[in-house]
Image: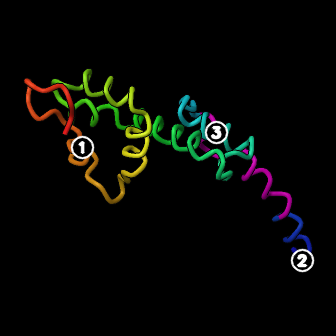
Amino acid sequence: MSKTNRWIVFVIAIPVFVARPAWADEPVSDADQAIVDLYKSGKLFDKREYKAVRAAFAHQFAQKHQSEIQSAYGEDAEQLTAWLKERSDIKESFYTALNEKYDKVEAALRLFSFPSKSTNTPT
């Protein structure tokens, strides 16, 4: 096979492998889809869309780490989740600051916990 023929085979083969990645059949979560939609619309890298991007990544984090969130917040999970929902800026900044590669997610999530049953605000 000549060098030119090898090049042609290579150029033809690239779209076959690139166009359909192996994970294409896996279902996409709604959180992942929100990020894909931001990318497709061109808003993912638009600094004016920071809050929408942060919200999408915070939602993705919450979906991915639901079990750690429940475990870290313990008995107060429902109450604390409601408190954070009312304060979306705090929740989104906190969730997007965590990086599972470098942080112990569950331990970091415990930073937001109620000090005692007698008070109604997190520390």
**Left or right of residue 116, residue 70 in this image:** right
Q: Secondary structure at mark 1?
A: helix
> Where residue 18 sits in the image (x, y, percent)?
73, 52
Q: Quadrant of residue 101?
A: bottom left
Label drawn at residue 24:
3
Q: Is residue 2 above or below residue 81?
A: below
> Where residue 55 sits in the image (x, y, percent)?
51, 38
For the residue marked with disc 3, what is the amino acid? Ala
Distance from Cα at disc 3 to Cα at disc 2: 34 Å
Q: Secondary structure at mark 3?
A: helix
The residue at 60%/40% (across/down) is 35
The residue at 43%/40% (across/down) is 92
Q: Which residue is mark 2?
A: 2
Q: Quadrant of residue 2?
A: bottom right
> Where residue 99 sits in the image (x, y, percent)?
38, 53
Q: How many marks?
A: 3
17 in magenta: yes
> Where residue 22 sits in the image (x, y, percent)?
61, 44
For the residue marked with disc 1, what is the amino acid? Glu
Q: Which residue is mark 1?
A: 106
**Label 2 Cα crowd, 10 Å radius (few <14 / some 14-19 / many 20+):** few
